[in-house]
Image (cartoon, rainbow, N blue to C red):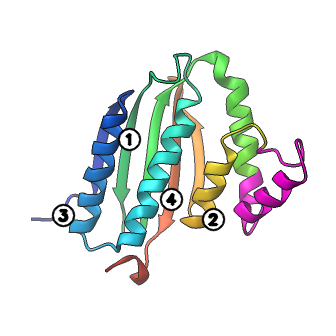
Amino acid sequence: MPMKKTMEFSLKSNSGEIKKLEQKISNFLTYRGYSNDFIQDQIMILRELIISGKKFDNLRPSEFEMSVQLHIENNTITVEVKKSVCESAYGKLEALDKTIQWIRGYQDPLEDYMINFAEGPGASPLAGTNGLGLARIAHQANAIIDFYVSEDNVLNLSAVCNLNAENFS
């Protein structure tokens, strides 16, 4: 029987659900032979994408609902969160686009973020955004971050990592 390559979850505002999801992803990847460091990177990506997705809620910060997917292809692994957004969030989506474009423009976005952060407010387009978490995903997990908003106003925010022999135990 072939191994399942995709995990999908519905996630609500309960932090206990996030811990359970992290454990399920850890078990899913451990069973497939991935190294502990790689698994921890994927869990970090999951957390950061959830935090980023929560920023598009009209609800209180403790209330949210989103879909989470982890998918393994031949040479990549993708973590994606899907979250309904309303039209009032479009300004935030423009800021997210600028943040992701800025991160992609640097070989080491985390280092550049820290240098700009030390230079003061306004030195980096990440100031006041969730940019540090996204920069961390790009730097620590060597992931490519992207997003789009579907016709039915669902934000799809993802991080894709290449797989190689070092990712396995």
Under tag 1, what secondary structure?
Answer: strand
* Direction left: furthest residue: 1
Sequence order check: which comes first, mark 3 or mark 4? Answer: 3
Amino acid under disc 1: Val
Under tag 4, what secondary structure?
Answer: strand
State yes or no: residue 111 in magenta: yes
Q: CA distance from mark 2 to mark 1?
A: 22 Å
Q: State if disc 1 and disc 4 touch (CB < 8 Å).
A: no
Q: Residues within 10 Å of mark 2 (few under 14, many from 20)?
A: some
Q: State if disc 3 and disc 1 touch (CB < 8 Å).
A: no
Q: Nearer the viewer, residue 63 or 90?
A: 63
Residue 33 x, y percent position in the rendering: 26, 74
Instruction: Nearest to the eye among marks 3 and 2: give it.
Output: 2
Sequence order check: which comes first, mark 4 or mark 2? Answer: 2
Taking 47 as reference, is 96 left or right? right
Sequence order check: which comes first, mark 3 or mark 2? Answer: 3
Q: Is residue 140 above or below residue 8?
A: below
State yes or no: residue 110 in magenta: yes
Q: Residues within 10 Å of mark 4 (few under 14, many from 20)?
A: many
Q: Residues within 10 Å of mark 3 (few under 14, many from 20)?
A: few
Q: Is residue 151 above or below residue 163?
A: above
Q: Which residue is mark 1?
A: 68
Q: Residues within 10 Å of mark 1 (few under 14, many from 20)?
A: many
The magenta stretch is: 102-126
Q: Residue at x 77, y 52 (%)?
A: 102
Q: Quadrant of residue 35?
A: bottom left
Amino acid under disc 3: Met
Amino acid under disc 2: His
Amino acid under disc 4: Val
Q: Which residue is mark 3?
A: 3
